[in-house]
Structures are given as C-alpha cells and as structure tokens.
Image (cartoon, grey):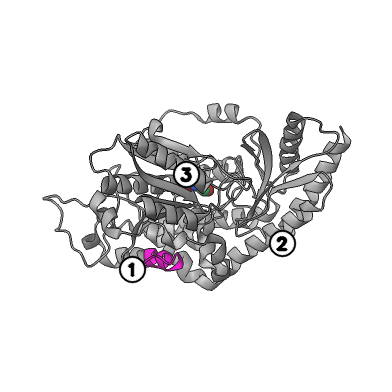
C-alpha cells in the first residue's frame, strides 16, 4: 500500500487504505502475541553485530509497501531480543505490556491531540489527571500531592531531585548532599548529576545483612556532612531493590528525614505497586510518608515501556519547579491539572491514555489479584529452592524477587561459587523457556528470580524451579 503517487505532496491515506493497513498490522500483532507461550524466552542474539551492520541503509528516497516492511519486523527483528513480554521472563524487573495499553497508544498517536496544556484538550487531560489521582489513592498520598508521567523511573528521579533541590537549596546547590545506599539503583546517581548534584555530593550508605540501608550509618553520614559545613537535603530509600528486592526501613528513614529536615524520596519503581494490595501494605510500611515517590507503571502495572510516574506530596513544590508562562500560550489556571505546569515537557505524547484505558478495562480488583499472585509465586519458588541441595537463599522475597547462589563442597572458593551461579543463570536461559539474570552484589554473584510479568503463572514458575534444579545438579556433578 503506497501513498498516492499522483500528488507527491499529499501525505494522507484514504479510509480504505487505512483499514487495510490497520487490519494487516493487527493480524500480525495478534499472531505475535498468541505465539508468546511457545516463543523462546530470549531470542537469538548470537550474531547481533552482523545483523545490525546489515540493517544500516541510506535514507529511502521513495516509500515502500507496508507489508514488505512488516515482514522482516515480525519474522526476524522483533524476535531477536530479550523475551520481555513472554511468560518465562523472570530476568531483571519484568514488565509485560497489557493489550489495552497498546490500543491506547494507537488511539493517542492517531488522534494526536495536544495534551501539554489543559486548554488544548481539557477532557483528555482530565482523564490523565484521574489516573494520577488513582495512583495517589493507592499510595495513600494526601490530596495536595501532584504528579507527572515520565518516560520511566529514571526521569521521575530526575524531576524529584530537581524539585527537592529547588525547594531546599534554592540557588545554593554546591553545599547540598544527597544520600543513597549501596543497593540503590544507579539511575539515581545519574539523575543527581543531571539535576546539578555532582558525584562528590552523593553519599553511598552501607546496608545490613538483608541489603537494607543502615539507618545508623545514614545518621552518621548526615552528621559528618553537617560538621563539614555541607547541607544534607535529600535521602533515597528503595521499596524493592533491583539486585535482591530488599525493602529499606522506609518508616525509620522517614523519621530520620523528618528530624533532619531532609526530603525523603522512595524509589518504588519496582515495588511501589504492591501497595495497591491492602494486605501487602505492611511490607511497605512508611511508603505513604514519602515526600516523593517513583512508580514505574511499565513494571508493576504491566504497561508498555515508556510509562514512568512521579508523585510529590507537596504538589506546589513540583509546580514551583516547572510552572512558566509565555505570551503565545493561554494564561495558567489553578483548578485543573495541567501537565506543562507540573513537568518539564510542553509538547508531549499522551501517556495518560495508556494508564486510563488499562485501568478502566482491567479494573483495580484484577490488578490486585495479579500482584498478589506474583508475590505468592515468588514465595513458592523461594521455598522450593531453599530445600534444594546446593542452593543458598540470600534474599527471601520481600515482594516478588528472590536472590540465591550455589554452594557445595565442590565449589571451594567464592570465585567458583560465582562462576557456577552465573553458569546456572545462563544454562536455564539457554533452554529457551525461562529467562533469568543475576547480579554482582559486592563480592558475590547472585542468581535472581523476579516474578512480575502478568503472563507468568504458576506453571511457568514450576518450570523455572525444575530447570534450576536440573541445571544445578548437572553443574555440581561436573565439579
Ligand atoms: C527499573 C528501576 C529503576 C529505573 O527505572 P527505569 O524505568 O528503568 O528508568 C529505578 N529503580 C528501581 C528499583 C528499578 O527497578
């Protein structure tokens, strides 16, 4: 299906053409998703360099037919990747991509309305505001809180740091110090740098035996910086670390932050959405006290990548950072949520529709059921591995992530244990049904299972455990 050739400046398509193209695309998407249960857990990445070199091409002078473009995309390129949407994806922090969100992205891009300022599409912006209110309710933040959608957790951290810096340091940036733990996600150091907080003002606090920030060490670091004439202004705790799933003592850190006048940010990029489930709230005690909170709907709400979120308790502080006006724009108003007043973007996509359509179609109850199930599955896997010879559990699931390593008399050194654990992750992944990754944590390489794809159900976790047992037995027998 080509653009009409008679008038090269006419870029539009006829209704009939659009229908044919839409149906061709939908047919491939549905076939792709229907094949996920048997698709490899990780695509063929063996010769990625050659593949990518072969893909380089000069800009096409003339358009191509859609079908000829979709053919290699679906037949080859999409599959040459981590199987992030498959049921066996228990690597890193899974996401998923529920189907209503894909429909919303299609609608948003096709309608292409301007949602940067409220006046341009009031109803659409209100739908986005509703979803931010729903997130606020689930996190038990006050009505005064405001938020924004970001491309991901990393940019949520950036906006949080900039907001705290503006409120607490003003223009006196160099005296400000910021506190993370050795297990904090690396994107926070990066976001700090972007927000003007240089690496020599970022303090890395030690963790306890369960990989949680040590509050005594945090207090000592704050005191040392004050004694040196610096101004501690912000601390990050994590509601579920990427390495081991550890939940920091959020409540105790909130107490210390309140005493010291620090802005307390909670990184809930992985774990925040477990707070939707009332029975699981005790696991995240203190989270609602945060000054700001990172959420990644593209993880715990199973939405497509590109959907991060930030909530800020003092909504006016977020607005104070971002609010601006211009002679060519309508006057700012106060009653309705206005994306450009609360975030750095002016022209932007419309992330709110993805969140709105997914929540409206799925409903909060099914989200809670899915999240509770993922936690149960991780607990089950941990219990099974704990009674399997050779496995040592380093971190039981606090949410839905567990970490472990291999130990046996045959593995005499730490290096041997690390090599065996690493080989175990690779051996299971190579079998094609489950994808696992580990993490170097200090001196030790830890294996991990993170259950957070909505497609991961009991049978897939059983397969994961069984294959871990078989491959571990083979590895240990080989020594
Ligand atoms: C994923 C993750 C991040 C980074 O978020 P992105 O969406 O990848 O930018 C930060 N912290 C934690 C705990 C995460 O799991």
| First to last magenta residue range | 130-143
Question: Quick one: label 2 or label 3, which is nearer the N terminus?
Answer: 3
Asked whether mark 2 and ligand 1 are closer than 8 Å, the reply comes as no
Count up the numbered dots: 3
Q: Residue 71: which quarter of the image?
A: top right
Q: Is residue 7 above or below residue 129?
A: above
Asked whether the residues under the numbered discs 2 and 1 touch, taking CB atoms below 8 Å apart as contact, a structural biologist would say no
Question: Quick one: label 3 or label 1, which is nearer the N terminus?
Answer: 1
Determine the CA span between mark 2 and mark 3. 40 Å
Determine the CA span between mark 3 and mark 1. 30 Å
The answer to whether residue 274 shows anywhere in this view is yes
Give me the residue at 61% from left, 39% from top: 80
Q: Is residue 327 above or below residue 101?
A: above
Give me the residue at 22% from left, 52% from top: 323
Q: Residue 81 placed where, x, y %?
A: 60, 41
The answer to whether residue 11 shows anywhere in this view is no
Of marks 2 and 1, the one in the foreground: 1
Q: Residue 357 placed where, x, y %?
A: 44, 66
Identify the residue position indicated by label 1 in the image.
143
Magenta span main SS? helix
Structural crowding at the residue carrying mark 2, measured as other residues with C-alpha within 10 Å and reported as few (<14), some (14–19) or many (≥20): some
Identify the residue position indicated by label 3 in the image.
218
Identify the residue position indicated by label 2 in the image.
458
Q: Does 9 sit left or right of 45 as displayed? A: left
């Amino acid at each position: 299906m080509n653009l009409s050739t008679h008038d090269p400046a006419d870029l539009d398509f006829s209704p009939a053409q659009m229908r044919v193209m839409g149906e061709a695309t939908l047919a491939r998407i549905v076939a792709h998703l229907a094949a996920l249960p048997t698709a490899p857990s990780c695509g063929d990445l063996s010769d990625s360099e050659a593949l990518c070199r072969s893909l380089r091409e000069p800009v096409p002078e003339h358009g191509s037919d859609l079908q000829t473009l979709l053919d290699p995309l679906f037949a080859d390129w999409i599959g040459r990747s981590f199987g992030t949407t498959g049921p066996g994806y228990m690597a890193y922090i899974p996401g998923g991509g529920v189907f209503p969100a894909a429909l919303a992205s299609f609608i948003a891009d096709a309608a292409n309305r301007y949602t940067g300022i409220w006046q341009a599409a009031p109803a659409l912006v209100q739908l986005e505001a509703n979803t931010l209110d729903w997130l606020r309710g689930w996190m038990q933040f006050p009505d005064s809180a405001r938020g924004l959608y970001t491309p991901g957790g990393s940019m949520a951290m950036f906006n949080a740091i900039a907001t705290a810096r503006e409120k607490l340091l003003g223009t006196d940036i160099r005296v400000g110090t910021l506190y993370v733990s050795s297990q904090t996600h690396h994107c926070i150091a990066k976001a700090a740098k972007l927000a003007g907080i240089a690496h020599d003002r970022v303090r890395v606090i030690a963790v306890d035996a369960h990989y949680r920030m040590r509050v005594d060490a945090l207090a000592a670091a704050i005191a040392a910086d004050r004694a040196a004439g610096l101004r501690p202004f912000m601390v990050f705790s994590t509601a579920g670390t990427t390495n081991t799933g550890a939940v920091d003592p959020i409540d105790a850190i909130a107490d210390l932050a309140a005493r010291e006048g620090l802005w307390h940010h909670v990184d809930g990029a992985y774990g925040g959405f477990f707070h939707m489930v009332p029975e699981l709230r005790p696991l995240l005690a203190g989270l609602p006290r945060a000054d700001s909170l990172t959420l990644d709907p593209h993880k715990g709400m199973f939405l497509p990548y590109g959907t991060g979120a930030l909530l800020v308790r003092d909504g006016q502080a977020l607005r104070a950072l971002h609010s601006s006006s211009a002679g060519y724009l309508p006057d700012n108003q106060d009653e309705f949520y206005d994306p450009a007043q609360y975030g750095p973007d002016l022209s932007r996509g419309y992330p709110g529709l993805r969140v709105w359509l997914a929540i409206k179609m799925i409903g909060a109850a099914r989200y809670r059921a899915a999240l509770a199930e993922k936690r149960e599955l991780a607990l089950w896997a941990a219990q099974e591995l704990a009674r399997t010879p050779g496995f040592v559990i380093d971190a039981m699931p606090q949410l839905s992530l567990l970490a472990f390593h291999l130990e046996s008399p045959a593995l005499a050194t730490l290096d041997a244990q690390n090599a065996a654990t690493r080989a175990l992750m690779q051996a299971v992944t190579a079998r094609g049904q489950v994808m696992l990754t580990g993490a170097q944590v200090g001196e030790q390489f830890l294996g991990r299972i993170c259950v957070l794809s909505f497609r991961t159900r009991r049978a897939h976790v059983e397969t994961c455990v069984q294959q871990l047992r078989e491959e571990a037995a083979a590895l240990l027998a080989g020594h």
